[in-house]
Image (cartoon, rainbow, N blue to C red):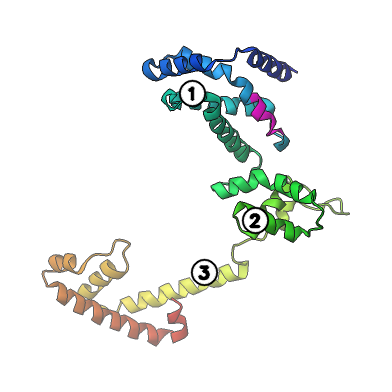
Amino acid sequence: MKTLSADRRMIKIAMAAPYLEREEEQELAQAWKDNHDQNARNKIAMAHMRLVISMASKFRHFGLPMSDLVQEGHIGLLEAAARFEPSRDVRFSTYATWWIRASMQDYVLRNWSIVRGGTSSAQKALFFNLRRLRAKLAQGDRQLTARAVHEEIAAALGVSLADVQTMDARLSGSDTSLQAPISSGDADGGERLDLLACAAPLPDEQVSDMIDQERRRTWLGHALKQLNEREMKIIRARRLSDDSATLEELGVDLGISKERVRQIETRAMEKLKAALVAQAPMTALTSM
C-alpha cells in the first residue's frame, strides 16, 4: 500500500509540473551547458517526467514494477538533460525520448528473466517487437503456420529464423527453478535439477584415466633414468617445465653453444622414445 501511495504521489507531482515553452527550455539548457546549473537541469527533467510515466506504461506488460520503470526512465531523462545541446534547435522531448526508452529497455532486459539475453541490437529489436509483429500477422486474413509467422518476423527484423524461434520459446514461458518438484504420481518425484545431464566423465572412465596417467608417469620415470645429468637438465628445462627455457639460455648456463644444446636435446628425446617403446605398446604412447 505504501508503494502504491508513493507511486500515485509521484505521478501526481509529475503531472502537475508546468510545461516549458521553447524559449524557456532553451534558456535552461544553455544555463546547464554554460554554468552547470543543477537547478536548470532538474527543472528541465521535472517538466518532462510525464513523458517518463507515459513511456513506462508501455513496458508494464513485462510484469515489472511501474515504480522501477519510472526510476530507470528518470535516469535516462537526467542523462538526456546532461547531454542536450540547445544549439541543435531540437525540442528536448524529442531528444530525451531515445534516452528514456533505452534506459527502460536495458532495465527490462536485465530483470525480465534470470537468463541474460538480447545483448545485440538485433536481439533487442527481436525481444521488444516479436509479440507486436506476431499479433499483427495474426490479425490478417491469411492462415499462417507457426513457422511461416517466424519466417516473416525474421525477414522483417533481419534476424535468423532460429533466433526468432528461440526468443518466442523464451517469451512463451516463465523461468522455472531447478529446485521445483517434478510433476509425478510419486510422492517423491525429485527435482528438475535431477534431470540435468552431468558433463563429467562416468566413474569408470575417471578411474580408467587415473590408472592410465599413473602408468604413463611410471613409464616416463623409468625412461628418464636413461639420460645423463646434462641431458636430464636440458629435457627438464625444455620439455617438463611450465616456463620453457630457450636454447640460448641453456647454452649460457651450460657453457656450450645453443646448437650443441639442440643436438643434445634431440639425442635425449630419441633415447626417451626408445626407452618408452621398450616398456609400453605404441598405441599407449601415441595417446600420451
Q: Nearer the viewer, residue 78 or 284?
A: 78
Give the amino acid at mark 2: Ala
Classify residue 217 as left or right of residue 122.
Answer: left
- Does 156 appear above or below 86? below
| Image disc number at residue 136 | none
The residue depicted at 43 percent of the width and 26 percent of the height is 85
**Can you give x and y, in whole percent of width and height, for residue 182 in the image?**
80, 52
- Does 134 appear above or below 262? above
Mark 2 and mark 3: span between their CA atoms?
50 Å
Which contiguous range is marked in magenta? 53-60
| Image disc number at residue 81 | 1
Mark 2 and mark 1: span between their CA atoms?
36 Å
Q: Secondary structure at mark 3?
A: helix
Please tell me which of labels 2 and 1 falls first in the chain: 1
Task: Write down the quadrant of residue 63 in the picture.
Answer: top right
**Can you give x and y, in whole percent of width and height, for residue 47 in the image?**
57, 17
Is residue 159 in sight in this rendering?
yes
| Image disc number at residue 154 | 2
- Does 149 appear above or below 115? below
Q: Which residue, given by chain and number where applicable, does mark 3 sit on?
A: 210
The residue depicted at 50 percent of the width and 74 percent of the height is 212
How many numbered marks are there? Answer: 3
Mark 2 crowd level (few <14, some 14–19, many ≥20, 10 Å Cα): some
The residue depicted at 24 percent of the width and 64 percent of the height is 245
Mark 1 and mark 3: span between their CA atoms?
64 Å
- Does 14 appear above or below 214? above
Give the amino acid at mark 3: Met
Is residue 117 in sight in this rendering?
no
Please tell me which of labels 1 and 3 falls first in the chain: 1
Between disc 2 and disc 3, the foreground one is 2
Asked whether the residues under the numbered discs 1 and 3 touch, taking CB atoms below 8 Å apart as contact, a structural biologist would say no
Outermost right residue: 185
